[in-house]
Image: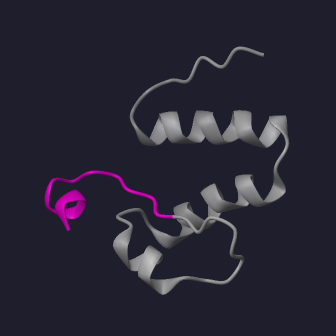
């Protein structure tokens, strides 16, 4: 994939399905543990989890997230 060839961090997550989708896992460039962690924020929901998700994504992108509360 282009993301893999260029060292781009890519997380492909299922939209509403709770079943494991191996195509998404294999297409992602992040480790499975990281994908599971990101998906966990969505599954738990709520403002605190979305704030934590933004911070985690920012760290993955090499940035610090300044989240306005």
Q: Horizontal and vertical percent for residue 39?
A: 65, 61
Residue 15 falls left or right of residue 58: right
- Confirm whether the magenta stretch covers residue 10: yes
Residue 66 falls left or right of residue 68: left
Q: Horizontal and vertical percent for residue 31?
A: 44, 67
Residue pictured at 39% horizontal, 67% vertical: 28
Residue pictured at 82% horizontal, 49% vertical: 45
Farthest residue, direction front = 16
**Quadrant containing the C terminus in the rendered view:** top right
Q: Nearer the viewer, residue 6 or 13?
A: 13
- Confirm whether the magenta stretch covers residue 24: no
Magenta segment? 1-12
Residue pictured at 58% horizontal, 41% vertical: 56
Type of secondary structure dominating the magenta stretch: loop
Q: How many callouts does the rendering have? A: 0
Q: Horizontal and vertical percent for residue 46?
A: 85, 42
**Quadrant containing the N terminus in the rendered view:** bottom left
């Amino acid at each position: 994939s282009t993301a893999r060839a260029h060292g781009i961090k890519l997380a492909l997550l299922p939209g509403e399905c709770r079943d494991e989708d191996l195509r998404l896992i294999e297409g992602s460039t992040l480790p499975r543990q990281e994908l599971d962690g990101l998906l966990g924020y969505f599954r738990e929901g709520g403002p605190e989890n979305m704030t934590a998700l933004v911070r985690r994504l920012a760290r993955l992108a090499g940035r610090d997230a300044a989240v306005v509360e």
